[in-house]
Image: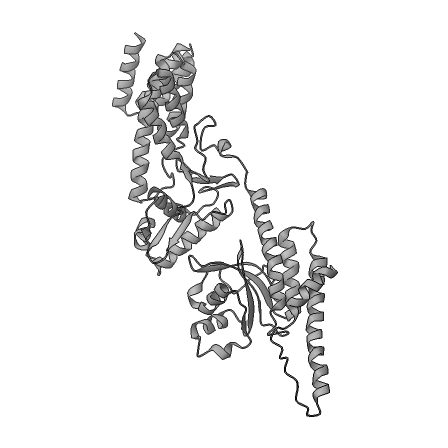
Amino acid sequence: MKDIFSILRNGFVRKDVSEEPLPDDGTKEEKQEEEPECRKTFEHQAFEAMGRIYQNMDQKAKPSDRILVMLQEIMDFYQADWTGIISLDLSVQVWTPYMWISMRTGVMGWTRIQPIEYSESFDRWVACFQEMKELIINDREEIRESEPEEYENYVRLNASAVMAYPFNKKQKGFLLVRNQKQHIDRPELLKQCCPILVAEMNEESIMKQVSELPKPTLFDLDVFPEDSDIPVADVVVGMFGDPCVKTRNGMISLSKNHSPIAWRLFSYLLLNQGKVLSRDSLIEAIGRDAEVSDPARNLRDHIYNFRSLFREISEEEIIENVRGVGYRIGKNISIVRDYEMFDRYLEHAKQATTNFSRMQCLETAVRLYKGKFFAEENDDPHITDAATQYHIRYLTAMEDLLRTLFEAGDYDKVQKYAGMALKYESGKMEFYYWLILALKKCNLDQRAMDIDAQAENNLDEEEYHDLCVALKIQIR
């Protein structure tokens, strides 16, 4: 601990103290005594604060609890009424409160900072972040005329004074205090705490992945059958049924992380990978909401939300901002999509030279299908067109597979795949046909009668009549 304090000592000593001799006016001795005493007082208090932080940050506690210990000590040190961490994402020009303590509302209580703030009105903060230098506002009235928009934000946030220091490692943002009453122009403690803070935030992110998300390998992901020929990739995307994105660190899905518009936006970008899509085209793709006064900002919010979800399972950037143009799927990230693999195996089935290899390819293809493309209802023509096309291809492939399996005498698999197909399309006569035939071949007459009753209920009168005729012909 002594070595740590001796290292930190340099961080707490002011670098701008003048080395010029004091004038000999009879007060020289007094001033020489006062100035070192001032510095000693600040250093002493800062060392004590750091000592309390190290002592109270129990290594067995959760990273979030250790961060709160640090924030509380910082708030006490500066005698502030609020201290916290702001997380930045300047690629979409937004920032969000990550963790905070308020003297009035306590730990993570109500705060005036919105869940999403926009950086356009905080240009000086952005400049400080880019230059990695502190920002100090001792009195907001001093910037009332020069920075009116920033001033209005301070009024909204009840901030008469602010002091902040940026961090820009794996985590990006500011550590800050509001309405500080002590050491009002000495950000050294904030600066010394930033590396510790980043380390704790990184550990918190890792623990969140461990506790909330599964950690499968690509070959365990149920998007693909275990025996399918999956290329090595950073990300596996499943768009059939409930959309999901999986990495080796976990999964996010529409059903678990419900934000249909953000997922629709991601789907549209995915279908156009390799292209940079303009903001206007993306706004049209997700649909214009009459209640949204600023569509461009609304678009940024949805992009930010999806990127935040993805960061829980990957360090890669899955949606990139191309400045002045629009957005695209990250060009440096390798993605395997279930619908591309579906196409791949159907093509292999066409080229197969034996019934056995053809059946294997068809089986793999139909097992990839988990329901219609992007099952969430929406009116986006790009997604609905893809959903219709893939559903038709699935029905054709499944009918081909059932016929091939029946001809090969594999009646158990006919039952398996026909039952699977009826979950996604209960109005397809051919599926009932092959299932009933396979059941009869296995002498499961009662089960065949039950399926016949289902067919009568789900098919229209003409289709059911055709089914009965076909079955009689086949039975003969």
On screen, residue 8 versus residue 145, left or right, reads right
Residue at 55% from the left image edge and 67% from the top image edge:
164
From what the image shows, is residue 239 above or below residue 2? above
- Colour scheme: one colour
Residue at 38% from the left image edge and 32% from the top image edge:
341
On screen, residue 429 versus residue 212, left or right, reads left
From what the image shows, is residue 25 above or below residue 186? below
Q: Residue furthest toward the top?
A: 476
Task: Report the number of numbered marks.
Answer: 0
From what the image shows, is residue 388 above or below residue 31? above
On screen, residue 133 versus residue 451, left or right, reads right
From what the image shows, is residue 403 above or below residue 3? above
Q: Residue furthest toward the right?
A: 2
Residue 313: x and y in percent read 51, 44
Residue at 27% from the left image edge and 19% from the top image edge:
465
Relative depth, front residue between 31 and 317: 31
Q: Quadrant of the N terminus?
A: bottom right
Residue 348: x and y in percent read 34, 25
Q: Quadrant of residue 426?
A: top left
Residue 265: x and y in percent read 37, 48
Relative depth, front residue between 226 and 2: 2
